[in-house]
Image (cartoon, grey):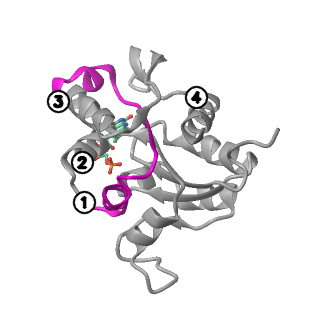
Amino acid sequence: MASRLTGCKVLLGVCGGIAAYKAADLAGKLAGAGATVQTILTASACELITPKTFEALTGQPVYTSLWTGSEDFRIGHIRLADWARIIVVAPATANLLAKLAGGLCDDLLSTTLCAAWQKPLVLVPAMNTNMWSNPAVQRNVKAVEQMGATLVGPKTGRLACGTEGLGRMAEPAEILQAVETVLA
Ligand SMILES: Cc1cc2nc3c(=O)[nH]c(=O)nc-3n(C[C@H](O)[C@H](O)[C@H](O)COP(=O)(O)O)c2cc1C
């Protein structure tokens, strides 16, 4: 049976969390399942992983700024929002959740998400346990769920900060499954 991802236009947003390296695996798996994957990296994500990694794994353009990279006359964030069948943000930082919940638009990813609010959205949060349990973060999580986003994780396990707890990014296979479910 053909995957729902075959020919599906997936916009992948990558934030500046240490789990950004796992987003590269996710991008490869989405492309391997037949999806056309375009990627937006935030400025913080670019500190942790390079756009070239995603370009190579997806064979598609990678965008990092509101102000550069348009290859046609349409404004980039509107074009990307219109293009996407589904949007996946992995890892989603505490910062991104706050911006999404508050409607902030100060970079390409947050502005595209604002313009694409009617599109299916899968968020994969990952952060330190204390950040995740922060009441403001939990308030933002509830707000984005109420706006219709599907959250995958976070999971309990070993975290980059050296502790064990809730905050680990879900594995790419589980995210792929969640994307298929949302598409259904
Ligand atoms: C090495 C490093 C790892 C980080 N990991 C995370 C993380 O896993 N989750 C998180 O929410 N923030 C993390 N941060 C903080 C974010 O990078 C920071 O809040 C940033 O403003 C996020 O920007 P963005 O949401 O535009 O990507 C990390 C910062 C550093 C320096």
Above or below, comparing residue 41 to residue 24 in the picture: below
| Magenta residues, start to end | 107-135
- Of the image marks 2 and 4, the number of the one nearer the N terminus: 2
Image mark for residue 136 = 3
Q: What is the C-alpha distance between the residues marked 1 and 3? A: 19 Å
The picture quadrant where one finds residue 173 is: top right
Verify CB contact (< 8 Å) between mark 4 and mark 1.
Answer: no
Q: Which residue is mark 1?
A: 105
Q: Which residue is found at the position 27% from the left and 43% from the top?
A: 95
Q: Is residue 112 left or right of residue 168?
A: left
Task: Give, as a three-letter code, the residue at label 1.
Answer: Cys
Q: Which residue is found at the position 36% from the left and 52% from the top?
A: 44
User: 51 and 122: which one is in front?
Assistant: 122
Q: What is the C-alpha distance between the residues marked 3 and 2? A: 12 Å
**Which quadrant is home to the C terminus?**
top right
Image mark for residue 171 = 4
Task: Give, as a three-letter code, the residue at label 2.
Answer: Lys
- Looking at the rendered structure, the secondary structure element under dot 3 is helix
Q: What is the C-alpha distance between the residues marked 3 and 4? A: 25 Å
Q: Which residue is mark 2?
A: 99
**Which quadrant is home to the N terminus?**
top right
- Of the image marks 3 and 4, the number of the one nearer the N terminus: 3
Question: Is 129 one of the magenta-colored residues?
Answer: yes
